[in-house]
């Protein structure tokens, strides 16, 4: 069976870099495919015996009729029971603006009279429903091109099972935007208020012991394990292959890190591919 990947998302979020990754890894790639052609192209490529087995293409608002036709084409694919993976790339507003200013490129919506900041905000609003339909949502705000390639490589390498990314963070620095599941662990005892633990982080065995020995933590982890064992197979059944789970505490250094590491180990034992990103570790003491 051929594998189809559709890449879309915000202008300036890295769609061209993502498509280049797929091209380099053996996919047959099409840039800016007209939305109305998606079902026909997929039908044709499925029947073309000599074409490559893996196909990727980008679609975005450079196409004039994008919003009129893209979701209709996805509905047609669903009606025909065509399997595909839809990747949505996004980035922080200020990052997107900076990328356009540094490269001196014109945002597609600027051609319709919007100034750059208005164009970025308008596009994000217009793509909200499409983002909800995506199998994979990647925030490239803090990713280099090579970081993005490595993340895509991890998701699409030929292995079975869901790929899971765990992000631990501090609420004081803002929530990650790409989370599928969010758990606020600020109800757990805070090592920050223990003088000998304050300057350590959740990787340290002393901090781990302090957090994990509490009855509330033990109960939470048991219930969390049951919840994830219930939810993840449902996500897989719906075609999701990349799940982002966030654990937040106040500063992102102690409790969220401990819980994130425990969940990483737990999911790894279940056979899932798990990466963990301690986004804010070390920012607070």
Image: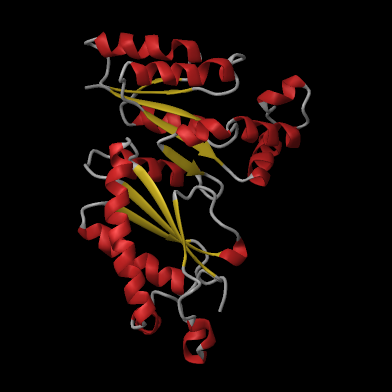
Residue 199 in view, yes or no: no
User: Could you say where residue 17 lies in the image, as x and y percent from the top left?
Assistant: 48, 33
Picture residue at 32% right of the left edge, 57% below the top: 227
68, 257: nearer the viewer:
68
Q: Name above or below for residue 179 compared with residue 199.
A: above
Please, which colouring scheme is shown? secondary structure
Q: Is residue 249 left or right of residue 270?
A: right
68, 158: nearer the viewer:
68
Q: Is residue 155 left or right of residue 14?
A: left
55, 122: nearer the viewer:
122
Q: Name above or below for residue 44 compared with residue 182.
A: above
Quarter of image, res 150: top left
Count the marks: 0
Picture residue at 62% right of the left edge, 14% below the top: 64
Q: Name above or below for residue 219 compared with residue 73.
A: below
User: Could you say where residue 110 lies in the image, as x and y percent from the top left?
Assistant: 73, 25
Quarter of image, res 206: bottom left
Which quadrant of the rendered structure holds the C terminus? bottom right
User: Could you say where residue 187 lies in the image, as x and y percent from the top left?
Assistant: 48, 74
Q: Name above or below for residue 52 compared with residue 22.
A: above
Picture residue at 45% right of the left edge, 43% below the top: 148
Picture residue at 36% right of the left edge, 43% below the top: 242
Which quadrant of the rendered structure holds the N terminus? top left
């Amino acid at each position: 069976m051929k594998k189809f990947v559709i890449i879309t998302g915000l202008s300036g979020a890295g769609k061209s870099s993502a498509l280049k990754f797929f091209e380099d890894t053996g996919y047959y790639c099409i840039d800016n495919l007209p939305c109305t052609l998606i079902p026909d192209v997929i039908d044709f490529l499925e029947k073309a015996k000599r074409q490559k087995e893996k196909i990727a293409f980008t679609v975005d608002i450079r196409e004039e009729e994008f919003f009129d036709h893209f979701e209709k084409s996805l509905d047609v694919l669903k009606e025909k029971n065509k399997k595909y993976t839809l990747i949505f790339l996004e980035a922080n507003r200020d990052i997107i603006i900076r990328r356009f200013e540094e490269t001196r490129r014109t945002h597609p919506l600027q051609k319709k009279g919007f100034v750059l900041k208005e164009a970025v905000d308008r596009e994000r609003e217009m793509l909200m429903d499409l983002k909800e339909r995506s199998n994979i949502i990647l925030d490239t705000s803090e990713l280099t091109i090579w970081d993005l390639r490595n993340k895509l490589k991890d998701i699409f390498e030929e292995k079975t099972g869901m790929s899971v990314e765990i992000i631990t963070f501090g609420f004081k620095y803002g929530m990650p935007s790409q989370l599928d599941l969010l758990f606020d662990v600020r109800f757990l005892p805070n090592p920050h208020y223990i003088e000998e633990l304050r300057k350590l982080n959740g990787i340290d065995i002393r901090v781990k012991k302090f957090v994990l020995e509490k009855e509330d933590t033990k109960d939470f982890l048991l219930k969390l394990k049951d919840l994830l064992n219930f939810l993840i197979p449902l996500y897989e059944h719906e075609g999701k292959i990349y799940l982002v789970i966030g654990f937040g505490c106040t500063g992102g250094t102690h409790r969220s890190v401990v819980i994130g590491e425990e969940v990483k180990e737990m999911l790894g034992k279940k056979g899932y591919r798990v990466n963990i990103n301690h986004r804010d570790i070390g920012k607070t003491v």
